[in-house]
Image (cartoon, rainbow, N blue to C red):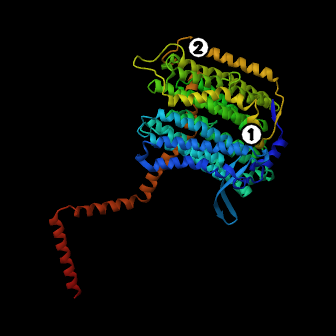
Amino acid sequence: MHDLSHGLATASLALADPSGGNSAVRATEAGGFAALGWLLVALPLAGAALLLLGGRMTDKWGPALATALSWGSFAVGVAIIVQLSGLPAEERALSVPLWDWVSVGELSLSAGLLLDPLSLAFVMLITFVGSLIHVYSLGYMEHDPDKRRFFAYLNLFVAAMLILVLADSYLLLFVGWEGVGLASYLLIGFWNWNPDYAEAANKAFVVNRVGDVGLITAMAIMLATFGALDFATVHGSAGGASDLTLTLIGLALLLGACGKSAQFPLQSWLGDAMAGPTPVSALIHAATMVTAGVYLIARSQAIYDLTPDARLVVAVVGAVTLLYGAIVGCAKDDIKKALAASTMSQIGYMMLAVGLGPAGYLYAIFHLVTHGFFKANMFLGAGSVMHAMDNKVDMRRFGALSREVKITWLTFAAGWLAIIGFPFTAGWYSKDYIIETALAAPGWQGWVFGGVAMLGAGITAFYMSRLFFMTFYGKARWHDDAHPHESPLVMTIPMMVLALGSLLLGAVLYPTGIITGWLEPVFGHAEHGEPLIPVLAIQITVGVLMVVGVALAWLRYGRDEVPVTAPEGSALTRAARRDLYQDDLNDALFTGPTMALSRTAVEADTTLVEGGVTGGTTSSLGSVSGLLRRAQNGFVRSYALTMLLGVVVILGAVWVMQ
């Protein structure tokens, strides 16, 4: 399959990307639209500020403005890409200085943006898919009384993710990182009048803070080792650091990535995050939050290329997660939670790819882009199904919807074909290249990672077909009071656009060389490597696994009658319904002991501090205050008597003193 020459990759990085150690050309020197790169972030950020500060006066036109500003950011991104495309490959890295941030003694940290092929690939995904989700939300949230606030949060989400991918340093990246966490918290818990939704938002927030400890630790080590946090200095100086230092940085960065991208062992929040409105789920899973971890690892290529141990751990985490998500997806009856499990699994493929070394970075980003289209397509399709079924999410209460919501069915089918790897769809191109790259890994890694990737493909075909057949085929299992109906055009048009991308994007990007040529200045030139078994044999094997997975799902959930109440199932099925007991494990290892420690501390404070140390003082003060309260009884005659007694005492004292 494909391999990347490490020497060429290093040379390309040194020429074009600040991660290779050289500073990017200033955008102001390059001229054109690149000098306006700050508008990419400023437009959606301004939309969020206007809608939040404008209050009810923006209710009518606020959502439309937020949508227009998101499209405006996309237009600026297109203009910058056109400009960069006209430059030689080695010059496709431009910087946009913003301000001097920290200046203490010899320490000087500045903020700026980096416009290079990697960051702009993410800009296109975030702004295009994100803007389509904005359009869809105009219909989905039409009758919500707080839709203005919802669109403000959507703009904030897009702006924060753009800061994350455009930052030229880990410090500014961290600002976007935290902004994404805040926006996800606000949107997951948007309907926080429901205690379960509020709890889901809190869970996502807390688990991501655990991952943040990793990113903060990595930055602390970088600052202590290199005296800087910008990509140019850190990546350019990485070769002079010790193996232990680089490994610690790589593992700390991975912990941060696991939190944001819901990778093992920090994946427990993703299923609960489906509590938010469905457009939020599409934004989190397709264009923003969960892709951040993959971006962090890919952007830190210069570090991981020098620490094979940390890179191997990245691959192991990805392999474990892709199987974990696939197994969990097989047992979920909630359509959104089944899709969430599939996202976890697909991001696992991307993490596996970036952990495989030079060849994997390109295919991870390629799969990330195609996945953004077909996953957004299916999440918006799930929202359309919910719109048709009075917000029901239980697939056991669906069935036969292909006759009722034909546009939703057809567009969802495009996403389904892509994710199961049907030949020549977007997912077939991108995921199969990851599988072939895994089988080209050295030694035992090729057999283990390649085998896991192929097994995951077969399971994916089964559980995604299960979802598709339970929803759109078989007998109608809804109640008589349900009246399925198609969504309005403002919702179905974005689904049509995404469906087209799900089918054609892979063929447009890869065989034409667009994606490889565009990312080559960052990741290096693609070389063909040899997997453990012939490529044709791999394609046939994966194709057979796909057919078997689809056939098994059809026999069980398409042809046969689906019980309205889920049967008890096997031990594995019961475990998968409970997310393989991840929450139980977290409670036993972390939450339970922490709560017990907190209760012990409170009891110690009550018993020892209040009872032993301050108990006597508290009791004495209480007795005195009790006596004083008797004097403050509210009767005027008592107060007059007290005043008279006071006068008598004062006169007596004066007489004695004379």
Choose top left, top right, bottom left or bottom right for residue 651.
Answer: bottom left
Q: Is residue 616 above or below residue 459?
A: below
Estimate how packed mark 1 is, as few (under 14), some (14 to 19) or many (20 or more) residues with alpha carbons within 10 Å.
many
Which element type, helix, strand or loop, lies under badge 2? helix
Q: Which amino acid does the dot numbered 1 rest on?
A: Trp
Identify the image quadrant of the C terminus: bottom left
Determine crowd level at label 2: few under 14, some 14-19, many 20+ residues with C-alpha closer than 10 A.
some
Residue identifier under label 1:
518
Q: Amino acid at mark 2?
A: Arg
Q: Residue at x 50, y 15 (%)?
A: 563
The answer to which quarter of the image holds residue 619 is bottom left
Residue 289 location in percent, x, y? 60, 40
Residue farthest toward the top in the current orientation of the protein: 560
Q: Closer to the camera: disc 1 or disc 2?
A: 1
User: SS for tag 1?
Assistant: helix
Q: Nearer the viewer, residue 308 or 373?
A: 373
> Residue under circle 2?
556
Q: Looking at the picture, tell me which residue is in the foreground, 638 or 319.
A: 319
- x, y (%) of residue 67? 52, 40
Q: Which circle's residue, 1 or 2, is located before the other in the chain?
A: 1
User: Do we see residue 124 in this rendering?
Assistant: yes
